[in-house]
Image (tube, coloured by chain):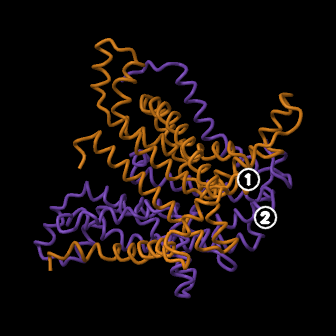
Amino acid sequence: MKRFAGWTLAFPATLLIVVFLVLPVLATIWTTFTTPAGPFATYLSFFGSSFRRTVLFRTIQVSLAVTAIALVVGILTAYVVSRAPGWLKSILIIAAVFPLLTGVVVRSFAWLIILGKNGILNSTLLKLGLISEPITMLYTQGAVIVAMVYLFVPLMILTLVGVLESIPDDLIQASASLGAKPSATFMQVTFPLAVPGLIVGAVLVFAGSFTSYATPQLLGGEQVMMMGTLMYQQAMVTFDWVAASTIAAVMVVITIAIVAAMNAVARRLNPMAT
Amino acid sequence: MTRNIHPLLIAGTVLVFMFLVGPLIIVLGAALSDTTYLTFPPQGLSLRWFENIFQIDAFRRTIFTSLQIALLSTVIALIIGIPAAYALNRHRIQLPGWLSTLFILPVLVPELVLGFSLLKNLAVQFNSPIYLSLLFGHSLIVLPYVIRVISASLASFDFSIEEAAISLGSPPLKTFFTILLPNVRSGVIAAFILAFITSINDVSISIFLTGPGLSTLPIQLLAHMEQFFDPTVASVSVLLMLLTVAVMAVVERTLGLTFLAK
């Protein structure tokens, strides 16, 4: 009896995941290979359509841009946060957690008010006389990137604060006492030790951007279609479920591939990890 | 501690935090505006857009549905997640290594894919009620939060207390409810509240599993935004932000907010 205790306790969760996640998702991927036209026909038609290729490349481009910006902003901010005195650090962490726990619709909506034709940014620029008529900011790639950076920077900051705090202060002090300037200490001690955390953060942000729906839908619309919004459109507007399943399969493969790559890199960088 | 940080870096950090908090303050201002269109700074102060939320039938209905789905899916996730977390901590040796990978699959698999698959291969294929797919979809995405938070609490639990109870003849279920559960109570509360807010805010699963007659609050917000540009959405957003504040207060009192920076 005792030998099976672990299995008994883990069984309900295992069952839920297998029945409601693994099987349905595998079935979705399976149907892309069993169309009457042949096993790879849907993929040939996906990559054969220049519109869908554009959407895929745009999604990769936007996700890379968001990841790069979030990494730079995240590491520099997390560095300052982790060095801040206690009371200030608490306030800064609260200020990062608050947007993190606020929903994606609310956070994207905020940018809709800011970037709209009669939005805050346009009316401010008009008032200052910097522009003579409102410029189109919504439904551009830039709008999607800004809103997604907004979405993911708190996650990056919090991940990296955790990483930076785990670096022993002795190393920093040793570096300083040996005469290194703060910038040299940062580049030669702190940064290399933070690399595994940076990779984790980058993968979280890239995967999150690559598969997002609400932000590209609200700020990109039809003009800046991404994989998520294209998948929704194929599934629920044109009811082409084979095409939607193909996009789903591409998303799953890319997400799992980058996570696997991250694990491999992290293992090479940290021989202590199992 | 090294305090000599370059002034440019401090200025940059100030800008980043203005960027993080500013947009949410703008939403708050827009919600309080006494105009029929969205504007900031608010022109005149009024709470009428908050009243308006409850006058719109679709918002009343979806707020109720969202609360119901969040509560039920969180309870389901707790009921199956607590034993799973316990098994992972206590009986790891009996369990295969791939099991912990299986338990993080709900985070790994894109939510859009999961939502679409539940629609296609469960709701439509077996002609089952869409509500069930929505409920199980939400239970799945909150399950990893429950397992992670409960595991963190169990890591600091002294299992010799439990062994003492068992060796004194306490039956397993009684031991669970009188010894284990009270000791990980703060973890359970934190897991509940984090799972609840995750479910309430979800878009990517729900977008495929809602339709005529069944919708959640975020999906209704998206639909409303596409038709109207009035401050109602801003006032609903403020209500959701108040919920976030409540959640943060609970997390701070149980796990401490720094738990989220790990």
> Which labelled disc corresponds to residue B52?
2
Label 2: chain? B
Q: Could you tell me how far apart the alpha carbons at marks 1 and 2 are, in whole angstroms? A: 32 Å
Of residues B130 and A244, the one nearer the viewer is A244
Task: Specify the quadrant that holds the N terminus of chain A.
Answer: bottom left
For badge 1, the amino acid type reads Gln
Give the residue number, with chain letter if any, for mark 1: A223
Q: How packed is label 2: few (under 14 Cα within 10 Å), some, or many (20 or more)? A: some
Give residue B83's position: percent from left, percent from top. 30, 71
Of residues B251 and A107, the one nearer the viewer is A107
For badge 2, the amino acid type reads Asn
Give residue B196's position: percent from left, percent from top. 50, 64
Q: Residue at the spot x=47%, y=56% of the render?
A: A254
Q: Residue at the spot x=13%, y=67% of the render?
A: B164
Q: Which chain is orange?
A: A
Q: Colour of chain B?
A: purple
Residue occupying the far right of the picture: A132
